[in-house]
Image: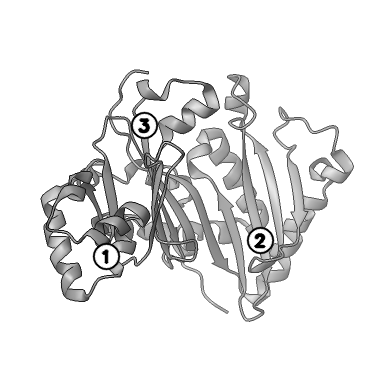
C-alpha cells in the first residue's frame, strides 16, 4: 500500500439531545411513531419487501432499552443510494439513525439522536435532514445545530506514516490500559475508562486490516487515534472553540524512556504493564511532576496534533445549520 500523509480529523459518531417543551412533546412523539408504524417502514409488515433503491423505503426497528437512559429507541436504517450504485459493500451502502425518547428520569424532557457523520455523504445528509424535519417539524429542526447538547462525539485521526514505538499520556486522567497479543508487542493503548468523560485509544489499524482483508501488515503503516468525548454539554456550533483544546492534553513519548535509569524500576514496570497514566497515578505529587519533566526529553508528536484541523469533521455536520434559525423560547 502506498504511503499516505496523515489524514485530518473526522467524526465517526455523534449523539445529541434536544429539549422538547411540554406543549410540543406529544406532537414529536406522534411524528416518530407514525414513521415507525407506516406500512413501508415497518419491518413486521414489510420484512421481505424492503427496497434499498426506494427513497422512501427504510428499515425501522423499535426496542426498549434495558440499561440505557431512555425507555424507547427507534433505529432507522437508511440506504445511501450513491454508494449503492457504485457497488459498495453492505456496510458502506447504508447508515443508521437512532432516536431515543421518554427518558427514564421523568424530570428530563429530551429526545436523543445518534448517527455517524463521516458515513453520510451528500445523499445521507439530505435524507437525515428530511427525517429530522419530519420528526421535529421545520422550526424545531432548524435549532438542532445551535441548541442541541452533544452527549457523545467520537473523533478519529489516522496516521499512515511509520512511527516510532511510543507511550501515550492524557493529562487529567488517572487510569490507562495496554493490550498486547501473544507476541507481546503493544497492540493498543487506552487512557481513561468506559465511565470517563473522555477516553482515548491508540491502536495498530494495520494489524486489523491484515486480519480482515489478508493484507501483509508489515507492508502497511496505519495507526489510529480515537477520542471519545461524553457528556460534552455544548452545541455543535461550539465544537471548534471547545474541542481543539482537548488535544493539548495529549502527550506521546518514545519508548526510549524505558531504559532511562532516572526512573524507578517499579514505575517502569507499571508503565509497561498498564500505561503511563496508571503508572504516574501511583506516585506522590512531587514524584509525578518530576517524572513528567523527565519524560519531556522523549516527547514527540506522531499525529501532528499541534497542526490538527477540525475542518473536515465540522464540514460533516454543517448540513444541520440553518440560515433561518431563530432561538427557541422555553415555555
How busy is the neighbourhood of tag 2: few (under 14 within 10 Å), some, or many (20 plus)? many
Q: Which mark is residue 280?
A: 1
x 30%, y 62%: residue: 279
The CA distance from mark 2 to mark 1 is: 40 Å
How far separated are the C-alphas under marks 2 and 3?
35 Å
Q: Earlier in the sequence, mark 2 or mark 3?
A: 2
Tell me what residue is drawn at x 33 percent, y 18 percent. Answer: 2
Question: What residue sits right under mark 3 in the picture?
Answer: 222
Residue 265 higher or lower than 172, as above or below: above
Image position of 148 with respect to 178: above or below: below
Front disc: 2 or 3: 3
Quarter of the rendering containing residue 105: bottom right
Q: Is residue 305 left or right of residue 312?
A: left
Residue 289 picture location, percent across and down:
16, 68
Answer left or right for 42 relative to 11: right
Q: Nearer the viewer, mark 1 or mark 3?
A: 1
Asked which colour scheme the image uses, the reply is one colour
Q: Residue at x 46, y 59 (%)?
A: 325
- Which image quarter is the C terminus in? bottom right
Q: Does residue 324 appear in the picture of this structure?
A: no
Vertical relation: 40 (above or below) 197: above
Left or right, 230 with respect to 242, comes to right
At mark 1, the secondary structure is helix
Relative image position of residue 60 (x, y in whole percent): 75, 46
Is residue 224 visible in the rendered structure shown here?
yes
Amino acid at each position: 500500500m502506498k504511503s499516505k500523509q496523515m489524514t485530518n480529523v473526522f467524526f465517526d459518531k455523534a449523539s445529541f439531545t434536544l429539549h422538547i417543551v411540554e406543549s410540543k412533546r406529544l406532537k414529536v412523539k406522534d411524528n416518530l411513531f407514525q414513521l415507525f408504524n407506516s406500512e413501508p417502514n415497518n419491518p413486521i409488515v414489510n420484512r421481505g419487501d424492503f427496497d434499498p433503491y426506494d427513497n422512501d423505503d427504510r428499515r425501522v426497528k423499535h426496542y426498549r432499552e434495558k440499561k440505557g437512559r431512555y425507555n424507547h429507541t427507534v433505529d432507522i436504517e437508511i440506504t445511501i443510494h450513491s454508494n449503492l450504485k457504485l457497488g459498495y459493500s453492505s456496510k458502506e451502502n447504508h447508515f443508521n439513525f437512532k432516536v431515543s425518547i421518554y427518558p427514564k428520569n421523568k424530570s428530563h424532557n429530551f429526545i436523543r439522536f445518534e448517527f455517524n457523520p463521516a458515513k453520510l455523504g451528500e445523499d445521507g445528509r439530505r435524507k437525515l435532514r428530511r427525517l429530522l424535519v419530519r420528526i421535529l417539524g421545520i422550526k424545531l429542526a432548524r435549532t438542532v445545530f445551535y441548541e442541541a447538547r452533544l452527549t457523545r462525539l467520537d473523533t478519529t485521526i489516522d496516521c499512515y506514516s511509520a512511527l516510532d514505538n511510543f507511550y501515550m499520556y492524557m493529562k487529567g486522567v488517572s487510569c490507562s490500559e495496554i493490550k498486547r497479543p501473544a507476541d507481546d508487542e503493544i497492540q493498543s493503548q487506552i487512557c481513561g475508562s468506559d465511565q470517563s468523560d473522555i477516553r482515548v485509544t491508540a491502536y495498530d489499524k494495520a494489524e486489523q486490516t491484515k486480519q480482515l482483508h489478508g493484507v501483509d501488515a508489515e507492508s502497511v503503516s496505519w495507526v489510529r487515534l480515537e477520542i471519545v468525548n461524553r457528556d460534552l454539554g455544548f452545541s455543535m456550533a461550539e465544537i471548534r472553540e471547545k474541542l481543539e483544546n482537548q488535544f493539548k492534553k495529549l502527550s506521546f513519548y518514545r519508548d526510549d524512556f524505558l531504559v532511562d535509569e532516572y526512573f524507578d524500576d517499579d514505575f517502569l514496570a507499571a508503565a509497561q504493564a498498564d500505561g503511563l497514566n496508571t503508572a504516574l497515578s501511583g506516585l506522590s505529587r512531587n514524584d509525578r511532576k518530576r517524572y513528567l519533566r523527565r519524560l519531556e526529553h522523549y516527547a514527540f508528536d506522531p499525529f501532528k496534533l499541534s497542526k490538527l484541523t477540525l475542518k473536515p469533521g465540522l464540514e460533516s455536520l454543517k448540513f444541520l445549520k440553518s440560515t433561518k434559525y431563530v432561538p427557541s423560547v422555553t415555555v
